[in-house]
Image (cartoon, helix red, strand yellow):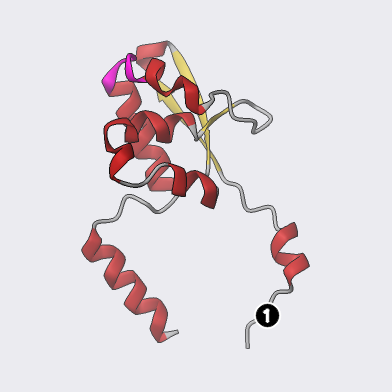
Amino acid sequence: MAKILTAEEILGAQDVQYETVSVPEWGGEVRLRSLDSFAVLRSTGPEKRNDAASLVVALSVCDENGDLVFKESDVAKLKAKNVHAIMRLSKAALRMNGLDKTDEEAKEEGESAKKD
């Protein structure tokens, strides 16, 4: 039987993931960190649709210490950047957070988890 975690173990778990993505349009690499649940909530919803890719980038790009480098107020400035770079970073961030699945894939994954 699997171990049941305590609140302290859950809250103390180091569960942030990182990924480095090459962005030739900007002449280097960008480090992404996984989104927390607050970031996911802030980046979803119909009112965010026009800003979605840039918002995901703003909520994911971090420095070598894992600290975010953008604020949500920077989203408009990011929207003015190269679309290929923004989409590459947004897709990578969504993929690393498991948010790139189609509705059907997510449904199948959920049904599979219920069987466990």
Most foreground residue, 67 or 46:
46
Decide if residue 60 is on the left or right side of residue 3: left
| Residue type for callout 1 | Ile
Decide if residue 11 is on the left or right side of residue 24: right
The answer to whether residue 1 of the structure is visible from this angle is yes
Whether residue 26 is situated above or below residue 19 in the rendered picture? above
> Pointer 1: what residue?
4
Q: Is residue 61 magenta?
A: no
Residue, far right: 8
Instruction: Check disc 1: other Cα within 10 Å, few if <14, some if 14-19, many if 20+.
Output: few
**Residue at point 33%, 35% (across, down):** 52
| Image coordinates for residue 108, horizontal then vertical, percent | 28, 72
Magenta stretch: dominant SS? loop
Query: Which image quarter: residue 23?
Result: top left
| Image coordinates for residue 59, horizontal then vertical, percent | 49, 34
Q: Quadrant of the N terminus?
A: bottom right
Q: What secondary structure is marked by label 1?
A: loop
Most foreground residue, 36 or 30:
36
Q: Which residues are magenta?
A: 79-83
